[in-house]
Amino acid sequence: MAALVGAALSGCSTSRQQPTAASSNASAIASPAARPVTAAATKGKPEPTHAALSSEVSTKSGSAKILLQIHQADLKEIAIGQVAERKASVSEVQAYAKQLVDDHTSADQQVVTVAKKMNVHLHDTAAKDGRHRSMAEQKLNSARGPDFDRLFLQQASADHDRLIKALKQEREDASDDDIEALIDKILPIFEQHKELAQMLIKKEQA
């Protein structure tokens, strides 16, 4: 009996140390590392498609358009606000003009920050911005006293009305988180500018 037990243990030890050819082959087949990498195995990580790249380019182009639009509006309001700070005939209009300059300067700094992050070049509109400033300043420079105040307030109200409508539409269409956050932050400020201009127009008329 002892001899049989010893022989059995010896046989188990031998079988563990020297696996059969069949078991070695089975392990080789079952081991993923032993199998060569095929084209089918790489399908889990697809390369970006042309459609995906086109969508990314389209999104960036749309974001650039929005940033340029806000930048241009900021420069225009800063320019006419600076003129009104010098020429307004009443202190309330002067104070409003200063608020326009300060708020649009701050808003434009935010626009520039987002543009840098998205690699958008805002200087592309420099010439166009210059034409807008020239036209706005020419109209205001020709007016004096209460006529100047009225023209300035009407222009500021109309400018902000157009800008607000455009930004609300852009907010609905925007697909970039930075653009959405920017619009959400500056839109209430521009709406306040429009309301203040209209209030001052009514007060001036009264």
Image: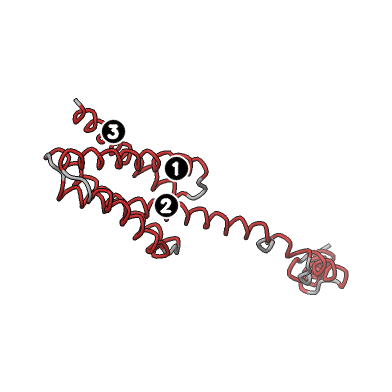
**Label 2 amino acid?**
Gln
Q: Is residue 34 left or right of residue 183?
A: right
- Which residue is pictured at 47% across the width and 57% down the height? 64
| Residue highlighted by disc 1 | 166
Tell me where residue 129 sits by quadrant. Answer: bottom left
Q: Are marks 2 and 1 in contact (CB under 8 Å)?
A: yes
Query: Which quarter of the figure has residue 160?
Result: top left
Q: For residue 5, which quarter of the picture?
A: bottom right
| Residue 95: x %, y % from top left | 15, 42
Give residue 186's position: percent from left, percent from top.
Answer: 34, 44
Front one among 158 and 175: 158
Residue picked out by circle 2: 69
Q: Earlier in the sequence, mark 1 or mark 3?
A: 1
Q: Amino acid at mark 3?
A: Glu
| 68 lies left or right of 152 | right
| Residue 5 relative to residue 148: left or right | right
Give me the disc on residue 195. Answer: 3
Q: CA distance from mark 2 to mark 1?
A: 9 Å
